[in-house]
Amino acid sequence: MQKDTLVVYLFAWYGDFLKKCKKYLVNIYLSISSSLYSTAHKNIALLYGGLGIGVGSFAGSMSALFRYNLSGGGSTNDSLLLGDGGLYNTLITAHGLLMVFFL
């Protein structure tokens, strides 16, 4: 196989590859957008459940972080959040809002 033939073959393969990737990405975009903007009750339930699982995981990890900080026995030297009261209060408030309004 000559060098020119190989280059033409590689460009043809790369062009086909890009077309397939574009088609695949367009299909993914269309399926996601059709799910997000759907009015079908099953899709809405799946989106609501996914949001609940995602927010619940995030708020649960925040809760685990708070429990880890409070398990230190009150020493603020090795604590992640207790040394800064403003950050701790902000995170506690965010955690409470997530738990009340999203779960």
Image: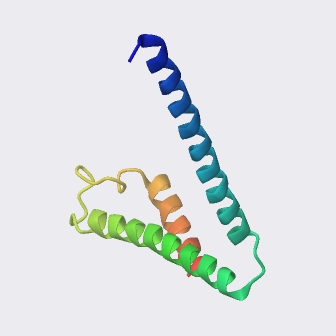
Which quadrant holds residue 29? bottom right
- Taking depth in this image into account, of 94 and 83 the one nearest to the observer is 94
The N terminus appears in which quarter of the rendering?
top left
Q: What colouring style does the render use?
A: rainbow
Q: Looking at the image, which residue is at 60% across and 80% down?
A: 46
- Taking depth in this image into account, of 63 and 33 the one nearest to the observer is 33
The C terminus appears in which quarter of the rendering?
bottom right
Q: Looking at the image, which residue is at 41% across and 73% down?
A: 60
Query: Which residue is situated farthest in the top direction here?
Result: 3
Q: Give coordinates of residue 21: x percent, y percent.
A: 57, 45
Q: Give coordinates of residue 86: x percent, y percent.
A: 49, 54
Residue 101 visible in rendering:
no
Q: Looking at the image, which residue is at 23% across and 58% down?
A: 75
Determine whether, in the image, residue 10 is placed left or right of residue 79: right
- Taking depth in this image into account, of 62 and 49 the one nearest to the observer is 49
Query: Which residue is situated farthest in the front direction here?
Result: 1
Q: Give coordinates of residue 42: x percent, y percent.
A: 66, 86
Q: Looking at the image, which residue is at 71% across and 87% down?
A: 41
Name above or below for residue 7 compared with residue 38: above
Name above or below for residue 54 compared with residue 12: below
Determine whether, in the image, residue 41 is placed left or right of residue 50: right
Q: How many marks?
A: 0
Name above or below for residue 22 compared with residue 35: above
Which quadrant holds residue 32? bottom right
Residue 98 visible in rendering:
yes
Q: Give coordinates of residue 100: x percent, y percent.
A: 58, 80
Determine whether, in the image, residue 75 is placed left or right of residue 20: left
Query: Which residue is situated farthest in the bottom direction here?
Result: 41
